[in-house]
Structure formats: C-alpha cells, structure tokens
Image: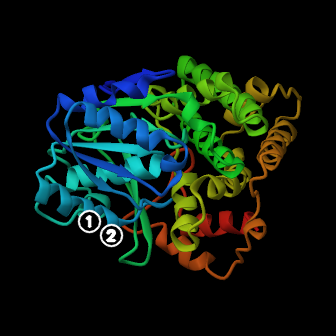
Amino acid sequence: MLNFEFYNPARIVFGKGTEESVGERCESFGKNILLHYGGGSIKKNGVYDKVIKSLKDKNLNIFELDGVKPNPRLSLVREGIELCKEKNIDFILAVGGGSVIDSAKAIAIGAKYEGDIWDFFVKGIATKDAIPLGVVLTIPAAGSESSTSTVITNDEDNNYKRGMQSSHYIPKFAILNPEFCYSLPKYQIACGCCDILAHLMERYFTEVENVELSDRLIEGAVKTIMNNATIAYNDNTNYDAWAEIMWTGTIAHNNLLNMGRIGDWASHQIAHELSGIYDLTHGAALSIVIPAWMKYVYKHNIDKFYQFATRVFHIIDNDKEKAVLQMIERLESWYKELELPTKLKDVNIDNSKFEEMAQRAFLHKDVLGNFKKLYKEDVFNIYNLCV
C-alpha cells in the first residue's frame, strides 16, 4: 500500500425530504445563487419546484442557467462564468447528474480565474480558488457530487473531451434523495449504473500490491451495483435499490477507494473520444470499451483479473485464462441485460475514425493507463476489439 492523504469535505445529506433543507444550506454562503441545471426533466418531476420553494423561503436571489447537455459543453461553461462575474454570484447550486455538476465545477473555478478556463484541462494549471457549490443529485452515475473530478467537452475546438482534478470545487454539500431517481428512463438508469461500475473497476485494476481492504471494498461495491441496477432497471420506483445505487455511486468516486493504490483510467480516456466525436452517452461508451480493454490487457497481470473473477463472479477454474474470459463474457451479458451496447456496431459506429481517435486520445499525453501502459498502437487495437 502506498502513502496517502485522504480529504473529502463534502457533506452528504441522504434520504427522503432532504431537499427541503437546500435553501438553509445555500443561505450560509451568501444571497446570490446560481441555479444550474439541464433540460426540462427537473421541472416535469417536481424537483425544480421543491428547490425553488426552499430557496425563496430564505429570500435568496436566484439566477438560473439551464441547458446542460450530456458531455457538458465548454460554451455553456463560459456563459456561466460571465454570469457569475456579472451578478456577483456567491454560491452555485447544481441540480441534476454528473454533467450538470461537472459544468458547475468548471464555472466555479473559471469565475475565479483571469485566463481561459480551458487552460485547466489541457495545461495542467493548478486551481487556486472557486465559488463554493452544492448539489441536489437526480442521476446517480458520475459520482461528481463529492469528487475532485470534472470533465468538459470543448464544442469550440474539435469536441475534445478532457477532465481535471481539484479539491477546490468539491461540493460543500450533496443532497441525495433516492425518490428523485424514480422518473429516470431505462437507458439513463443503465448508463448511470455502468458509469458507477466503471469507476470501481478503474480503481480495482492496479499494479500496487497489498491493498486488501480497498480490494474487498471495491468487490463488495461492484456486487452491490450490479445487483441493484438490475432491480431498479425492472422496478424504477424501488426505493431500497435506488438508495443502494445512490450511495454506491458516491462512494465509488469520492476517492476513498483510491487510497494507497493507483487506478488505471485508460478505459475512460479511450471512451471519451467516442463521446467527444459521436456524442455517445458516457455509460454507453464505457460498456463498449471496458470489455475490449480487459481482453487486451488481462495477460499483463492475470492474477489480478482471476481474483476479480473468483471474488465477484464466483468463477473458479484451474485454468485462470479460461476463468477470466468467462468473467468478461458475464460482464458483457450484464450490460446486455440492461440493453447497453457492447460493440460499436450496436450504436452504428464504424472503424473510419479509429486512427483519429487513437491520435486524439494522446493530446497533451505521452501514455494512457497505469495497470498496463498504453500507446497509440495499443489504443488503436482496443478500438478494433470494440467492433
């Protein structure tokens, strides 16, 4: 186990009716609130009205910025930055899923920076300050409600999709009411749970030894998400299943399971090119890429993959390779149960841009991944395994 320092100040407010406290929680940070959200779903399911009422009950000044899309756009982030500066925004409240939260995080740091916000994503500039923000979570998936991560798509420059890390924009609080998930369509349920599962597996496959505690925590979380995703997919008003999914999604990406180990993250970066170029939903891109990545790298450390196969999928075989390949097959079957794509042909994507995507994946990078170091030829080969 490596040396580490764990810090996460996000206050998780979990359960029924917890959204009623949002006005009081925002009030302590100032009067001018930027309410940031996506399309019309929070207005249709009543979440918007509940949030607005709580904010108005505290006589807060509300400025709204809607229009966040999946794979959140840099152009809207720029609009939010200008709005924050113009209205002297004290606090940003993100109501939605990972795309809304990531957009809010980028706005939060950009409003305190005199240069170009995109610098943070491609030049490795360290953040120094951010407008504080909070979250009302409606889509458990990205784990952005308590993470140090944000991912933005540059719709002004070739749709490059890039992420960054900073502790400055970890939300001050995140309200998690599982009832807010009841209105999610099946595709969003599936994609969200796939994203959570990916966050767990990206951390699991590490070259660092003697990390038994976090290994077993991740294994338990993987089982939890796979079991409850199936339940919620077939019964979208099952409170208990959504409670498990919401909490697992937060734990999967609040960095607790990172401690003492180094995750891989190549699958995410490879999948980002599918999302950036084809605007494919993040979870759907991951359900295609992760099995292909596994098939490409498992021989690098077959013992780690065999451990995953035995502990999570209960596959025991003297032939480790046979067990691992069976595990990957079962994982693909789980994706298919949730009607997620496992091949590029499932989403009508051909091989015409594999070379371009492999090249783009290395913008400002020399290598991808930590479990097995990947180079351009490797990424190109993984895309071919996705066909």
Question: In the figure, residue 57 lies in which quadrant?
Answer: top left
Question: Which residue corresponds to mark 2?
Answer: 75
Question: In the figure, residue 174 lies in which quadrant?
Answer: top left
Question: Which residue corresponds to mark 1?
Answer: 79
Three-letter code for the amino acid on which mark 2 is drawn:
Ser
Q: Is residue 175 visible?
A: yes
Residue 285: x and y in percent read 63, 58
Q: Is residue 237 above or below residue 370?
A: above
Three-letter code for the amino acid on which mark 1 is drawn:
Glu
**Which of these two is toward me, 72 or 3?**
72
Q: Residue at x 51, y 57 (%)?
A: 269
Q: For mark 2, does the 10 Å Cα neighbourhood hold few (<14), some (14 to 19), or many (20 or more) residues?
A: few
**Which of these two is toward me, 312 or 298?**
312
Q: Is residue 118 above or below residue 317?
A: below
Is 215 left or right of 157, judged from the image as shown? Answer: right
Real-space Cα distance between discs 1 and 2?
A: 6 Å
**Which of these two is toward me, 245 or 358?**
245
Residue 258: x and y in percent read 46, 31
Q: Residue at x 67, y 50 (%)?
A: 297
Residue 144: x and y in percent read 43, 41
Which element type, helix, strand or loop, lies under badge 1? helix
Labelled disc at residue 321? none
Q: Mark 1 near mark 2, Cβ–Cβ under 8 Å?
A: yes
Q: Is residue 259 visible?
A: no
Question: In the figure, residue 121 lies in which quadrant?
Answer: bottom left
Q: Residue at x 65, y 25 (%)?
A: 239
Q: Quick one: quadrant of the N terminus?
A: top left
Q: Quick one: quadrant of the C terminus?
A: bottom right
Q: In the current view of this chain or complex, which residue is farthest to the bottom? A: 352
**Which of these two is toward me, 281 or 306?**
281
Which element type, helix, strand or loop, lies under badge 2? helix
